[in-house]
C-alpha cells in the first residue's frame, strides 16, 4: 500500500472533480496532494485514475498506469 499508493500513484496523479457517494473518502484537491491518505490514492489508482488519465497523459504513461492498476487490483484480491 505505501509503496504503490503513497509512492507511485501520488507521482502520477492528475485528478479533478467529484466522486460518487459510494466511496468512503472523497479526494481532496490537488493542492493537498501531499496530505492525501493512502485510501484516497488507492481509490485513484484502482477506480478513477484509469478513466481520468486516458486523455490526459501520453499513451505510454497511460499504459504503464493501467498495468500498475491491474497488477495492484490482482494483488489486493489475493491477500
Image: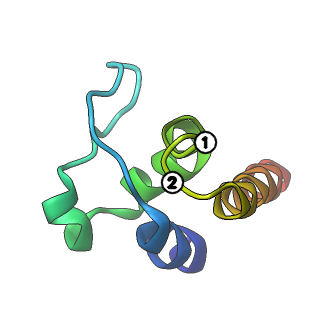
The image quarter in which residue 75 lies: bottom right
Q: Earlier in the sequence, mark 2 or mark 1?
A: 2
- Mark 2 vs mark 1, foreground winner is 1
In the rendered image, which residue does mark 1 sit on? 50
Give the side of residue 54 with respect to residue 56, left or right. Answer: right
Give the side of residue 32 with respect to residue 44, left or right. Answer: left
CA separation in Å, label 2 and label 1: 12 Å
Where does the image place residue 60, in percent across and percent down from the top left? 72, 63
- Badge 2 local density, few (<14 within 10 Å), some, or many (20+)? many
Q: Nearer the viewer, residue 36 or 29?
A: 29
Q: Nearer the viewer, residue 57 or 35?
A: 57
Q: Eyeballing the image, is 13 above or below 6? A: above
Q: Nearer the viewer, residue 12 or 36?
A: 12
Where does the image place residue 26, in percent across and percent down from the top left? 27, 38
Which numbered marker is on residue 42? 2
Give the side of residue 28 with respect to residue 19, left or right. Answer: left
Q: Quadrant of the C terminus?
A: bottom right
Give the SS element for disc 1: helix
> Disc 2, disc 1: CB below 8 Å?
no
Q: Eyeballing the image, is 14 above or below 47? A: below
Amino acid at each position: 500500500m505505501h509503496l504503490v499508493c503513497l509512492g507511485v500513484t501520488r507521482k502520477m496523479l492528475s485528478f479533478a472533480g467529484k466522486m460518487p457517494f459510494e466511496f468512503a473518502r472523497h479526494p481532496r484537491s490537488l493542492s493537498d496532494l501531499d496530505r492525501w491518505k493512502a485510501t484516497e490514492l488507492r481509490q485513484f489508482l484502482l477506480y478513477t485514475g484509469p478513466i481520468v488519465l486516458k486523455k490526459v497523459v501520453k499513451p505510454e504513461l497511460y499504459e504503464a498506469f493501467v498495468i500498475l492498476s491491474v497488477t495492484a487490483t490482482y494483488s489486493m484480491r489475493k491477500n
